[in-house]
Image (tube, rainbow, N blue to C red):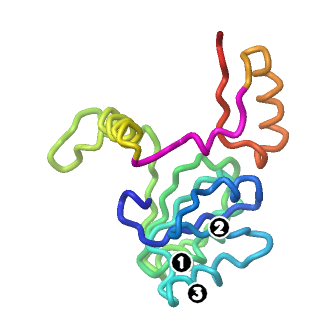
Amino acid sequence: ARLCGATQVCVVDVSDFRLQRLPDDAGVTAIHAERDRPADVVRRLTAGRMADVVFEVTGAADLIPREFEVLREQGRMVMLSSPRGRTAFDFHDLCNRFSYTIIGAHNFSHPPTATLDNPWTMARHVELFFNYLRSGEIDVTPLISHRASFEQAPAMYRQMLADRSQTLGVVIHWN
């Protein structure tokens, strides 16, 4: 988000473990969803303007309607997750009334071939990501929370299924 020009980035989570792994960057604000009211924090940080864009990354269907509380009128909700279960979604209150734009952004939404209207194929996104890594503009090492051998992989998967709040990125060594 910062590389794309966002000057204020807020991250909301219920896991202190995850929030503590955020970059030490003045433009990133950690919001604990159980201790803080995200809408109040965003309202204060944006002088009441609220968020231009919200990225849904939890996959928790029951949280999605509340995520709209931090979004400004005519803001964009980008669905990066794959929510499981039904979401109670009132189109009048959560879409029509405020003219929100909801964008599904999954791998399947990439065009197979670049066009002048949309050059962002999966290959182009991968190229951009690796260019950012090579240049040092992004660093994913803080996102690695665990390293495990391939023998430990089944236990690591069980741990993530039981409580994913204590895990971010897992590197499995295959040698």
Q: Which residue is mark 3?
A: 44
The three-letter code of the residue at mark 2 reads Ala
Left or right: where 74 falls relative to 46: left
| Rendered-image quadrant of the N terminus | bottom left
Instruction: Verify whether residue 12 appears in magenta.
Output: no
The image quarter containing residue 68 is bottom right
For mark 1, give the secondary structure. helix
> How dense is the environment of label 3, judged by Cα within 10 Å: few (below 14), some, or many (20 and up)?
few
Q: Which residue is pictured at 73% across the width and 24% down the height? A: 148
How far is mark 3 from mark 2, CA to CA?
14 Å
Q: Quadrant of residue 41?
A: bottom right
Alpha carbons under labels 3 and 1: distance apart: 26 Å
Q: What type is the residue that disc 1 sits on?
A: His
Observer-side mark, 1 or 2, equals 2
Q: Residue furthest bottom?
A: 47
**Which of pointers 1 and 2 lies earlier in the amino acid sequence?**
2
